[in-house]
Amino acid sequence: MNPILARYGPFFLFSFTVIMGLGILAGIGLTAVLARGYNKSQADWLNGLLLALVMAIIGGRIAFVWVNWDYYQGHFGEISLVWRGGLSYHGALMAGLISLAAWSVFRRHSFADMAGLLAPALVLGSIFGWLACWFDGCAYGRETGFGPLAVNLPDSYGVFALRYQTQWMGLAFCLIIFIIIIGLRRRLQPAVVFWLTLFLLSLSRVIVSSFRGDEMHLIGAYRVDTLFDGTLALLSVIALVTTAIVGRMVVPGENGTHNHGK
């Protein structure tokens, strides 16, 4: 764990900021490569991606502050210090998707096409997100005994204990999902790529959440994030089945590309 990479006088270089910045750049570069096989209606995909990124950061920060309001109500001046770390995956996901949908309507693009194009970048961003959490100490595992998934790790307050390696579990799941999506994306319609990505990511987070020990609001005996991810996974399955029923599961185009938007 190393939340601060370097210090320059009064200024700190936070590992969370650096890793997430690298993840954003990697996602943009990956999408630029994948966009070569898409039609002209998606030529301005970068504008949609940048808008979704900005709104995702804003939405992710708002959701994180809300979940941790007991702390921030006494440290109001830290709310805007997003570069120190502290983003909610679910808040970022919802804000990013809503803004991308609005942008697609405004630009008269297909939201399904845009979401399918950006889906691999979403997985890649999740990989960097779990890595950033490992450096920052967020999304830490609950305490446990000796075992193959346990190691001496701190929580977000710096208290060390034998904990589940939830950050590495999440990262490993995302790597597998990334390989699956990259391997299948040319064979599937963009809508299917997006819903499959969302299903796999949500399912993996449900599994990892059962090992997490960080504070989270509860509904009954269940974490709010677990219920949210479970709902997303269920909705994604419904969307996948609906897509299959209407006969749009696989539509190959010429030269390995799709006839998107037609």
Image (spheres, rainbow, N blue to C red):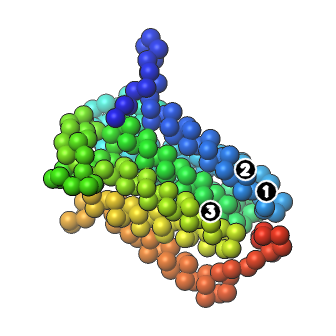
| 184 or 247: nearer the viewer | 184
Do the numbered discs 1 and 2 sit on residues whose CB atoms are within 8 Å? yes
Is residue 36 shown left or right of residue 177? right
Do the numbered discs 3 and 1 sit on residues whose CB atoms are within 8 Å? no
Q: SS at mark 1? A: helix
Mark 3 or 1, closer to the camera: 3
Residue at position x 37%, y 31% from top?
Answer: 2
* Image x and y of residue 165, in percent: 31, 50
Measured in 3D between alpha carbons, the distance from the residue under mark 1 to the one under mark 2, in whole angstroms, is: 7 Å
* Image x and y of residue 62, in percent: 43, 45
**Numbered circle sitting on residue 36:** 1
Q: Quadrant of the C terminus?
A: bottom right
Which of the 4 image quadrants contains residue 40? bottom right
Which of the 4 image quadrants contains residue 154? top left
Q: SS at mark 2? A: helix
Query: Pointer 3: what residue?
Result: 182
Residue at position x 51%, y 62% from top?
Answer: 177
**Numbered circle sitting on residue 32:** 2
Q: Earlier in the sequence, mark 3 or mark 2?
A: 2
Residue at position x 48%, y 69% from top?
Answer: 199
Do the numbered discs 3 and 2 sit on residues whose CB atoms are within 8 Å? no
